Amino acid sequence: MSDLSRRNFLHGSALIGVSVAAAAMTPMAAKAAAPKTARSLKEVLAMSDVDIAKNSEVVQSAYDTIVNVAKKIHNSSLRSTVLSILENPNPTIAEGNESQILSSLKKENLIAQNAQKVFPAISDSKHSPQPFWSAPGSGYGSHHAYPGGLATHTALNVVSAQALYENYRHINNLELDWDDAVGGEILHDLHKPWVFQWEKNHSCRVEQPLAGAGEHHVLSVAESIKRGINPSFVVAQACAHEHPSSKQGEALVVGWLKAASIIAGVDPVKYGLLAADLKTIPLPRRMEGYVVHLADHDWVISSSACQWSVQALKDLAKEQYGIAEESAFNSFRNYVLANLTAMRLYGILSSQGRKAFAADVARVVKL
Ligand SMILES: [Fe+2]
Ligand SMILES: [Fe+2]
């Protein structure tokens, strides 16, 4: 065997090793494809959005995937912090003085001058308004917009981050920090259960902007700071929505870290989140944030897949299930997507057509 073919062979085995390991860790697809007991529409309409996520094997298996990866975090105190956030993503940052935080953010032009609040509603900052596993993956018109969508979104991202970490090691011999790259991905959307609370009509709360991003991003970064997570992890997490390779890109990341520091009540330079001139992240820029950023890119396909599946479900609901009212449609949609996922359904619709799409939906909601 020549050196080259041996290298190719070893490289191929390594990549196969990653995908087999990933497949073994994520039985989500198998759960979505497995035989189902279809519920009647009446039964579906009686379920809460949290019940829907609780009863979905797909969602629970996605959540297990995330927890199992979190258990591999090397640093024991970081591991227990990450696991406790997954167990109860309660907003400890909401204990800060909101009006002071609001005026500091306004002074730095990090929030709209007419903003009245920084935080979404919370009745008890010791308890998350809903479990991590029942939150949608994004706003109701965007990706993974169904109960448990945060779990299915994060599961794919975390498995992607692990694979990217391995691939950079195999291809470029890079020794990145696994805890920052994979851990940063696990927590990147940690405050979505708070931001995207379920509404009475079974859609979810509309997100507000903060420092040029959806508020979940800055609030999630602030929570990691408030809980004392190390700065290199927090900077990597902050890169989920943008990377610092261009001046404009880095300015956004810097703005998010500044806003998160104000919310968490820390000095970003002393904490190690920004360079002394407050213009860049600490130099030289580390590479773990790029793994977090790249692995968060499932939204590129999953936003459209969710929107197109919802449109097809709307037609089906009207034509075959006799659903016309918005709240009933939202429940139907939430149940179907939590059990089958928007990605699976759009995969069927795009490759096999409307009949096969309707047949898959009928596996979970009786016609
Ligand atoms: Fe995000
Ligand atoms: Fe995300």
Image: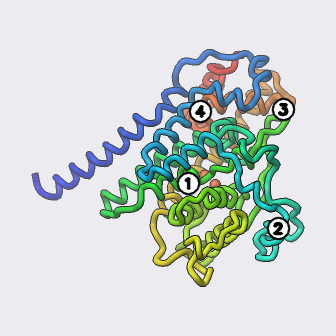
Q: Can residue 355 be seen in this view?
A: no
Of tags 3 and 4, the one toward the viewer is 4
How far, Cα to Cα, is label 1 from label 2? 35 Å
Tag 1 or tag 4, which sits nearer the N-term?
4
How far, Cα to Cα, is label 3 from label 4? 22 Å
Relative placement, left or right, of 298 versus 124 is left
Front residue of 293 and 101: 101
* Residue 152 horizontal/vertical position (percent): 58, 40
Residue to which mark 3 is pinned:
327
* Residue 348 horizontal/vertical position (percent): 57, 32
Residue type at tag 1: His
Residue neighbourhood size for the residue with mark 1, other residues' Cα within 10 Å, grouped as few (<14), some (14–19), many (≥20): some
How far, Cα to Cα, is label 4 from label 1? 20 Å
Residue to which mark 2 is pinned:
100
Quarter assignment of residue 153: top right
Residue to which mark 1 is pinned:
297
